[in-house]
Image: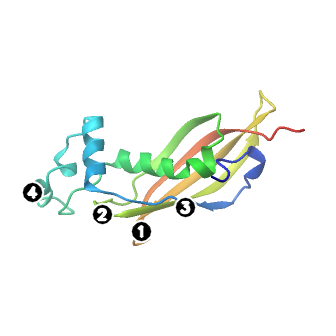
Amino acid sequence: MGQFGRYYEEFTIDQVIKHTATKTVLECDNNLFTLLTMNHHPLHLDKEYCKTQKYGKILVVGTFVFSLVVGFTVSDISGKAIANLDYEKVDHNGPVFIGDTLRAETRILDKRESKSKKDRGIVYVETKAYNQKNELVLTFRRHVLIPKKRSK
């Protein structure tokens, strides 16, 4: 296994990181997530109900899509993180359906050294997820507290 995560110094403003993790969303993924989170809305579970709605088929739960995409970013963004400080501006830009294959990329928007501890910094990022048709389906921003490399 290669490097897991990055140190503060390894992030550059405007850098775009294309995450290598991808996933095709399976019906069992969506079903398990709805059961685990108690989200039993028929839009996520009932094919017949969905036939009467806008898209005509089951929609994957948005919080599953969000969780999955955050997971895509761990090895590149938060693998060495001390903490994810916040998640903000989560936009569900388009629907995700069973069988869609998702990928993501993250842009480094800003970074600054911690004011209280000199051994770390805060990196501000925006992650975008796309389906197999290259349609934008999710965007979110977050601040991540990242350690600096130890000087030897």
Q: In this view, does 45 lie to the left or right of 114?
A: left
Find residue 102 and report its image quarter. Answer: bottom left
Using a 10 Å C-alpha cutoff, classify the residue at mark 1 as few (fewer than 14 neighbours), some (14 to 19) or many (20 or more).
Answer: some
The mark lying in front, picked from 4 and 3, is 3
Is residue 33 visible from the viewing direction of this image? Answer: yes
Mark 4 surroundings within 10 Å by alpha-carbon count, few (fewer than 14), some (14 through 19), many (20 or more): few
Q: Which quadrant of the view contains residue 138? A: bottom left
Mark in front: 1 vs 3: 3
Which amino acid type is marked by label 4? Glu
Residue 90's spot in the image, x, y percent? 46, 47
Q: What element carries label 3?
A: loop
Q: Which residue lies furthest to the top in this view?
A: 116
Q: Which of 150 and 121 is in front in this view?
A: 150
Q: Which of marks 1 and 3 is nearer the N terminus?
A: 3
Residue name at image x 29 percent, y 36 percent: 36
Q: Secondary structure beneath disc 1?
A: loop
Where does the image place residue 107, in percent across and percent down from the top left? Answer: 62, 57
> What label does residue 48 carry, if any?
4
